[in-house]
Image (tube, helix red, strand yellow):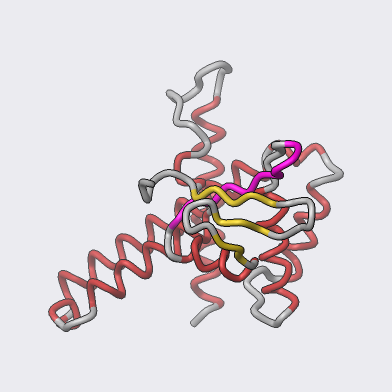
Amino acid sequence: MAEDSPLLIKRYASRRLYNTETSDYVTLEDIAGFIRDGREVQIVDLKSGDDLTRQYLLQIIAEHESKGESVLPINVLTDLVRSYSTSATSVVPQFLAMSFEMLRDGQSKMMENMEKMNPMSTMPGFEAMKAQQAAFMKAMTGGMGNWPPRASEGEGREGGGEDLDEIKNQLADLQAKLARMNK
């Protein structure tokens, strides 16, 4: 099966997860490994056919967070919980998608600059590090790189381009603040 097609995992009534490509049972950690390696995964209930991918991805994140492998700060988690009970729910997915897109673009530019300016780019293993970084970003963004769909500015309503520009400016400000905090 092609690497660009999602890996189909079936969940049996016993809650066991079955990899349809290798014909064996897998764990949540195995699934997390597939995703870190850059593979898209789809998990479906064998009996009902329901897509359970989101549920299992959230479970993987929760397990990593509970083990002390915290990626999401408490204030971000709190804001996510709040967004489920407010009208901001419709804005949050777009904001997160754009944030990860900006992060991915920034890291790509950083890697390009490293290649141009850094003698490390000629060292053995640099390409592997670059590939690992790309897989990490793909896993972190959950394949949201193509979302939200691109539309011409202002399509469907007046001033849409201005709203997008304002959001982009806010995201750039947030990234600058985060960069200063990490120094």
Name the foreground residue: 80 vs 11: 11
The picture places residue 115, in percent across and down from the top left corner, at: 19, 71
Name the foreground residue: 79 vs 38: 38
Please tell me in which quadrant of the rendered image residue 39 appears. Answer: bottom left
Range of the magenta residues? Answer: 39-48
Q: Residue at x 51, y 54 (%)?
A: 100
Q: Residue at x 60, y 46 (%)?
A: 95
Q: Residue at x 42, y 57 (%)?
A: 104
The picture places residue 71, in percent across and down from the top left corner, at: 62, 72
Q: Is 88 situated left or right of 94 in this image?
A: right
Name the foreground residue: 108 vs 27: 27
Q: Is 12 situated left or right of 163 in this image?
A: right
Q: Is 102 situated left or right of 131 in this image?
A: right
The picture places residue 36, in percent across and down from the top left corner, at: 48, 65
The picture places residue 158, in percent across and down from the top left corner, at: 56, 18
Q: Is residue 116 above or below residue 101?
A: below
Residue furthest right in the image: 85
